[in-house]
Image (spheres, helix red, strand yellow):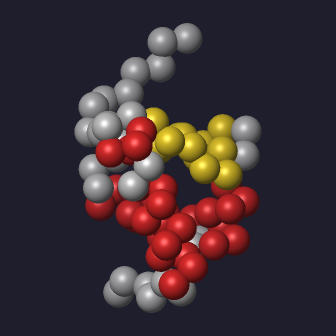
Amino acid sequence: MTPVLSDRAAAWLNSVFSAKAAQRGGIVRRSVRDVEDLIHRDVFLSEIRRRGFTAVENGGQFVIFCNAEPLYRVV
């Protein structure tokens, strides 16, 4: 079942994925606190998966790779 988002939460989520970097297949980052306060972690991660993107969490930030390319840790 898809959760119903408030107008504010839906607008925020839309702004994440309409950012220029996201549209170009780049990287965007958002505060874990903002995600949890506005839409909840599970909803956010579900939307990332739905779009075929990948994300990591580090230092209180989600880093979202807005493409379907594989990730390789190099160091």
Q: Which of the 4 quarters of the picture holds residue 17? A: bottom left
Residue nearer the viewer, 27 or 52: 27
Residue at point 28%, 50% (across, down): 52
The residue positioned farthest toward the front in the image shown: 20
The residue positioned farthest toward the top in the image shown: 75
Residue nearer the viewer, 70 or 4: 4
Residue nearer the viewer, 58 or 13: 13
Q: Is residue 7 left or right of residue 59?
A: left
Q: Is residue 60 left or right of residue 55?
A: right
Residue nearer the viewer, 66 or 24: 24
Q: Is residue 1 left or right of residue 41?
A: left
Residue at point 66%, 45% (across, down): 61
Residue 34 visible (yes or no):
yes
Residue 54 visible (yes or no):
no
**Residue 8 horizontal/vertical position (percent):** 57, 79
Answer above or below: position of 58 versus 48. above
Answer above or below: position of 9 versus 3. above
**Residue 64 horizontal/vertical position (percent):** 47, 43
**Residue 75 horizontal/vertical position (percent):** 55, 11
**Residue 59 horizontal/vertical position (percent):** 73, 38
Residue at point 40%, 21% (across, down): 72
Q: Which part of the image, by quadrant, shows the N terminus?
A: bottom left
Total label count?
0
